[in-house]
Image (tube, grey):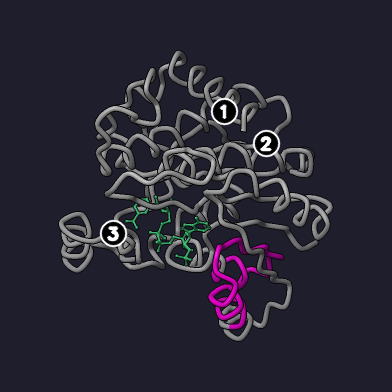
Amino acid sequence: MKKNCIITGATDGIGKQTALDLAKLGYCIGLVGRDEQKGTLVLDEIERATGNQSLQFFKTDLSNIKSLESLSNELKEKYDSLDILINNAGAYFSEYIQTEAGLEMTFALNHLNYFRLTHLLMDIIKIDQPGRVINVASSAHFSARLDINDIQMSKGYKGWTAYCNSKLMNILFTYEIHKRFKETGITFNALHPGFVDTRFGDNNTGLGKNILSIGKRLIAINVVKGASTNVYLASSDEVKNMSGKYFDKSRSVRSSKVSHSEIYQEKLWSYSEDILNNL
Ligand SMILES: NC(=O)c1ccc[n+]([C@@H]2O[C@H](COP(=O)([O-])OP(=O)(O)OC[C@H]3O[C@@H](n4cnc5c(N)ncnc54)[C@H](OP(=O)(O)O)[C@@H]3O)[C@@H](O)[C@H]2O)c1
């Protein structure tokens, strides 16, 4: 039977390549992105390259947390059950930006979007197979400087630190949801895709963008390699019973010390819930 998979941020970079690779394996894929035109082009491209006709594009700005409820309703109309959810959409914002709901943009897109969408879809993620939730984090989390009492960096925003913090949050969230839902059999894992040559960072101007561009030209891996840990976690039997882990190069490795702090995991969870209750 075909496996149902949702990938966020599937119109470019690692998410798009993951969609292409899983389409080759015959998965039925919901590609989520914010740009309808780009989504249609990507869908056509993947369909032509793979012959897979079981692909659909869903348009949502994932930083708009309120809109995730209608996205989840649309997804549930299409899919009775989900085998895989890949929370992948993410970005780095060198300047402070607020979403319509007054949230700091990096926090909203990179963390709260993963947190909210996973919760909204939990009731259709398969518990018998079991389903897999994959959170694309980053080794940048090792450089996080998260003030757990000022999670959205209201004092002295620094774009790169906000990004590193958000990637730490991806791992804190993965470990906490694993603890809370492990009896379901659903697996929850986080990963670092490598330093990958994508459009990551291109939304910025100035030094932040230039440093990343030079780095990408000199040392980044290509997007096929960059998608490989996603594809491994989504499709390999080797990891079907592994949960609450952090992967790099398709291997479970140790994440930073602070990512294992149960106090941070619980505080981030309740802070995220409080925000959602007041949105
Ligand atoms: N590249 C790296 O070296 C690297 C390293 C470690 C971790 N990561 C992580 O890998 C993930 C994917 O990054 P990437 O390198 O593939 O970046 P990318 O090439 O910029 O792709 C990001 C994807 O997310 C989508 N997206 C961005 N903002 C969105 C929003 N508000 N609503 C809906 N979709 C949105 C983009 O849509 P558009 O096509 O409309 O722009 C695109 O499809 C991120 O979580 C990033 O933190 C990347």
How busy is the neighbourhood of tag 1: few (under 14 within 10 Å), some, or many (20 plus)? few
Any magenta on residue 27? yes
Secondary structure at badge 3 equals: loop
Amino acid marked by disc 1: Ile
Placement of the N terminus among the 4 image quadrants: bottom right
Residue 35 marker: none
Query: Is residue 111 toward the left or the right of residue 194 in the image?
Result: right
Secondary structure at badge 2 equals: helix
Amino acid marked by disc 3: Asn
Q: Is mark 2 within 8 Å of ligand 1?
A: no
Q: Position of residue 63 (x, y in %)?
A: 52, 49
Residue 275 marker: 1
Q: Which residue is mark 2?
A: 119
- Please tell me which of labels 2 and 3 falls first in the chain: 2
Q: Position of residue 44 (x, y in %)?
A: 61, 82
Any magenta on residue 234? no
How busy is the neighbourhood of tag 2: few (under 14 within 10 Å), some, or many (20 plus)? few
**Which of the 4 quarters of the picture holds residue 75?**
bottom right
Foreground mark, 2 or 3, reads: 3
Secondary structure at badge 1 equals: helix
Up-down: is 155 above or below 231?
A: above
Amino acid marked by disc 2: His
Q: CA distance from mark 2 to mark 3?
A: 31 Å
Q: Which residues are magenta?
A: 20-44
The reply to whether dot 1 and dot 2 touch (C-beta < 8 Å) is no
Q: Residue at x 70, y 44 (%)?
A: 131
Q: Position of residue 121 (x, y in %)?
A: 72, 43
| Residue that extends furthest to the top in the rendered view of this protein | 263
Query: Is residue 196 toward the left or the right of residue 76 in the image?
Result: left
Up-down: is 239 above or below 227?
A: above
Viewer-side residue, 246 vs 75: 75
Q: Which residue is mark 3?
A: 204
